C-alpha cells in the first residue's frame, strides 16, 4: 500500500466515518462511539504505517493489526474495505446472518482480520504471540494492538503488559484508544485507570501521549515507536467517543446504539464529504 | 510389562525428540516446567521455549498468536489452571481455530496430597463443549509418544490430558495410535468398561479379576474423548445390557457424560454406570487412599462392576 499524506489520511478517515455510520444504521445495532474514536488511528495504521497487501492477506512479512476492543470493528471493516480487502457494499451485510462481517472480529470468516476478539482483554496477548513469532523467525513484521480504556480493566491486559516488557518485544506497539467512556459510564467513575501513563511506564514501556484525532501526531508517534529498539512503546491516544458527529460526541448513549435513518442523515450532513 | 511411567514424563521425552525434527514446534510454560516436564525441551531448545510466568491467560493468547504464523505451540500447565481460563481458551483458541495444543497435566484425584485446588476434575467436561476442540488422554508411555507425533500434523485445537502418577503399560505390541478410535484391549461377552487415562490399567486388572469369578468383561481404551468413537461404543451397547465408563474426572460431563450422550441419542436402552468422581470436590490424601475412597482402584472398579452385573 502506498503511504498517504496527512491531508489524504484525514480525507480517508472522513470517508470511513461516513461508511461506519451507514453500515451501523443498516445493521440496526452496533457500537458507533468507540468506532468513531478509533477510526483516525486505524486509518493512519493501514494507509501510512503498516506494510500489508490486500491481495495477499496472509503475506508472511506483513505487519499485523489486532483490535483488542472488538466492538469497534466497524472502524476496521471500513478501513479494510477502503484498502480493497472487500467491497464497501459488503459492509452493508454487517451483523446479518451469513455475513463475513460479524458483530465482533472473526479471523476465520474474514481475510484481513488477524484475531477473533470481543471478549475484552485477549487481543494484546495474541499480538504478543505474533510479535514473538516474528522475532523467532527473523521477520521484520511489526504488530499493532489497539486496546480500549474500559478494556484495560481486564487483568489479562496487565499479564500481557508484564510479559511484553519482560520479553523486550519492541516489535509490538500497544495503542490505547482513551475515549474515557465505557458501557456503565465514565471510566473514571466505573474503575479509574489513572495514572495510566505512570502504570505503563512502571511496567517497562516508553509512553507517548497524543491527540488521537490529529493525523500528524498519530503518524509521528508510530514513527517514533518504529525507531525505538530499547523498550516497547505504549501510545496513549486521547480520543473523543463518537468523534465527528456533534450529537454523539462524549454522549455515552452512543456506546452501543446505532443511528436511525433520521439520525444517519443528520450525521452524514455534519460530516460532509462525498457520497 | 515395562516399567511404569507418568504420561507427563512420556510427554516431556516426546517434546525433546520431536523438537529436533519439527522446527515449528514451540513450547510455553507458566512456571511449572519441572512439573509438566517441559523443562527438557527448555534446556535443549531455549530459543523455542517461552517462559510465560504465572499468567495462564496471557500464555493461552500468546500461543494462539504464535499458531497463526504456522507454529505448533504446546502450552503447559496443570489441567485445572488451564480450565480456569476457559473464556480465553473459548475465544482465542476454540473460536479462532488456533492450532494450539493445550497440555493439562495433573489430571484428577490421582495427584494426591496437594488437594482439590490442584486437581483437574472438570477439564474434560469444559473443553469438550468447544466445537472443533479435540480432547485426548493417553493411557501409557507408548500411546503418549505416538499421540505426540500425531499432534505435529493434526490441524485444529487440542486438549491433551496427562497424569502426574506413573501408569503401567497397557498398549498391545505393535500398537498404532489412531485419532478418534477406541482401542479394544480385552474382549468380553457380559459387559464392557470404557476407560480413559489412568483408569485403563485399573480397569484391565479389574476385568481380569472378574474373569476368575465368571464374569466376561471387555475393556476399551478411549484415548480420544472427543471425537468419541461412537461406532465402537454403540457396537458394544447393542451387544450387552450394561456398559461402564471409568475415569479420574467428575462423571458429570466427562467420559461418562460423552458415552451417555452417545447411547441415549441413538435410542438404545443399554444401562450405563459411570465410575469416576461422583460430582464431589477432591481433597488431600495419598493417591492410593483417594482411589480407594472413590472406588477408582482395581478393587473398587471390580466391586462396582460386579455389584451391578450380579443384581
Image (cartoon, rainbow, N blue to C red):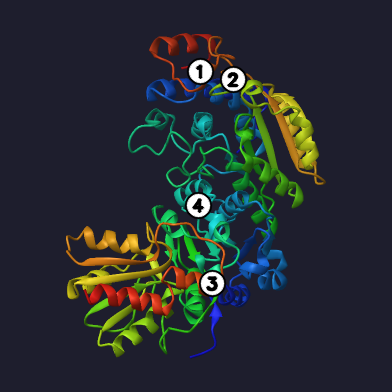
Residue A113 x, y percent position in the rendering: 51, 42
- Picture layout, residue B136 above or below residue A196: below
Kindly tell me whether residue B55 is visible in this rendering: yes
Question: Badge 2 is on which residue?
Answer: A241
Q: How many other residues sit within 10 Å of disc 3, few (<14), some (14-19) or many (≥20)?
A: some
- The CA distance from mark 1 to mark 3 is 57 Å
Point out the frontmost of discs 2 and 3. Answer: 3
Q: Which mark is residue A254?
A: 1
Residue B52 x, y percent position in the rendering: 68, 55
Q: Residue at x 17, y 63 (%)?
A: B268
The disc, 2 or 1, on the residue closer to the chain's N-terminal end is 2
Question: Badge 3 is on which residue?
Answer: B287
Q: Please tell me whether mark 4 sits on a helix, a strand or a loop.
A: helix
Q: Residue at x 48, y 61 (%)?
A: B159
- The CA distance from mark 2 to mark 3 is 57 Å
- The CA distance from mark 4 to mark 2 is 31 Å
Amino acid at each position: 500500500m502506498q503511504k498517504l499524506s496527512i491531508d489524504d489520511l484525514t480525507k480517508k478517515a472522513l470517508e470511513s466515518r461516513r461508511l461506519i455510520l451507514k453500515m451501523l444504521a443498516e445493521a440496526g445495532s452496533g457500537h458507533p462511539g468507540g468506532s468513531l474514536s478509533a477510526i483516525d488511528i486505524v486509518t493512519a495504521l493501514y494507509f501510512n504505517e503498516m506494510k500489508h497487501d490486500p491481495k495477499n492477506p496472509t503475506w508472511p512479512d506483513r505487519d499485523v493489526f489486532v483490535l483488542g476492543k472488538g466492538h469497534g470493528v466497524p472502524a476496521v471493516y471500513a478501513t479494510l474495505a477502503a484498502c480493497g480487502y472487500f467491497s464497501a457494499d459488503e459492509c452493508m451485510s454487517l451483523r446479518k446472518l451469513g455475513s463475513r462481517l460479524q458483530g465482533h472480529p472473526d479471523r476465520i470468516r474474514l481475510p484481513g482480520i488477524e484475531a477473533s476478539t470481543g471478549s475484552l482483554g485477549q487481543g494484546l496477548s495474541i499480538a504478543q504471540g505474533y510479535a514473538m513469532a516474528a522475532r523467532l523467525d527473523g521477520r521484520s513484521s511489526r504488530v499493532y494492538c489497539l486496546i480500549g480504556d474500559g478494556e484495560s480493566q481486564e487483568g489479562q491486559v496487565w499479564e500481557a503488559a508484564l510479559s511484553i516488557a519482560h520479553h523486550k518485544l519492541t516489535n509490538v506497539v500497544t495503542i490505547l484508544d482513551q475515549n474515557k467512556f465505557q458501557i456503565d459510564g465514565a471510566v473514571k467513575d466505573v474503575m479509574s485507570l489513572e495514572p495510566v501513563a505512570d502504570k505503563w511506564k512502571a511496567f517497562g514501556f516508553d509512553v507517548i501521549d497524543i491527540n488521537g484525532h490529529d493525523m500528524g501526531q498519530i503518524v509521528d508517534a508510530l514513527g517514533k515507536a518504529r525507531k525505538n529498539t530499547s523498550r516497547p512503546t505504549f501510545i496513549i491516544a486521547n480520543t473523543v467517543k463518537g468523534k465527528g458527529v456533534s450529537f454523539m460526541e462524549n454522549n455515552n448513549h452512543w456506546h452501543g446504539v446505532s443511528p436511525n435513518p433520521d439520525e444517519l442523515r443528520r450525521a452524514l450532513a455534519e460530516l460532509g464529504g462525498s457520497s | 510389562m515395562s516399567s511404569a511411567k507418568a504420561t507427563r514424563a512420556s510427554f516431556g521425552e516426546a517434546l525433546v525428540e520431536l523438537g529436533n525434527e519439527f522446527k515449528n514446534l514451540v513450547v510455553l510454560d507458566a512456571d511449572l516446567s519441572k512439573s509438566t516436564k517441559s523443562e527438557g525441551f527448555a534446556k535443549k531448545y531455549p530459543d523455542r521455549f517461552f517462559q510465560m510466568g504465572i499468567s495462564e491467560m496471557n500464555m493461552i493468547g500468546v500461543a494462539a498468536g504464535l499458531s497463526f504464523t504456522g507454529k505448533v505451540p504446546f502450552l503447559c500447565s496443570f489441567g485445572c489452571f488451564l480450565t480456569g481460563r476457559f473464556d480465553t481458551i473459548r475465544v482465542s483458541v476454540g473460536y479462532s481455530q488456533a492450532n494450539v495444543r493445550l497440555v493439562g497435566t495433573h489430571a484428577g484425584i490421582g495427584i494426591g496430597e496437594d488437594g482439590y485446588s490442584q486437581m483437574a476434575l472438570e477439564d474434560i467436561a469444559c473443553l469438550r463443549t468447544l466445537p472443533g476442540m479435540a480432547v485426548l488422554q493417553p493411557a501409557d508411555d507408548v500411546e503418549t509418544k505416538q499421540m505426540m507425533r500425531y499432534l505435529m500434523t493434526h490441524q485444529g485445537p487440542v486438549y491433551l490430558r496427562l497424569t502426574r502418577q506413573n501408569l503401567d503399560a497397557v498398549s498391545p505390541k505393535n500398537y498404532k495410535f489412531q485419532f478418534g478410535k477406541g482401542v479394544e484391549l480385552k474382549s468380553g461377552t457380559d459387559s464392557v468398561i470404557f476407560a480413559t487415562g489412568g483408569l485403563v490399567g485399573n480397569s484391565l486388572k479389574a476385568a481380569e479379576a472378574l474373569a476368575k469369578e465368571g464374569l466376561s468383561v471387555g475393556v476399551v481404551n478411549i484415548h480420544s474423548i472427543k471425537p468419541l468413537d461412537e461406532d465402537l461404543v454403540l457396537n458394544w451397547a447393542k451387544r450387552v445390557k450394561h456398559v461402564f465408563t471409568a475415569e479420574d474426572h467428575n462423571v458429570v460431563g466427562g467420559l461418562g457424560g460423552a458415552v451417555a450422550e452417545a447411547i441415549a441419542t441413538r435410542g438404545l436402552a443399554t444401562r450405563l454406570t459411570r465410575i469416576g468422581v461422583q460430582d464431589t470436590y477432591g481433597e488431600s490424601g495419598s493417591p492410593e487412599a483417594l482411589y480407594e475412597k472413590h472406588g477408582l482402584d482395581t478393587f473398587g472398579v471390580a466391586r462396582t462392576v460386579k455389584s451391578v452385573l450380579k443384581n
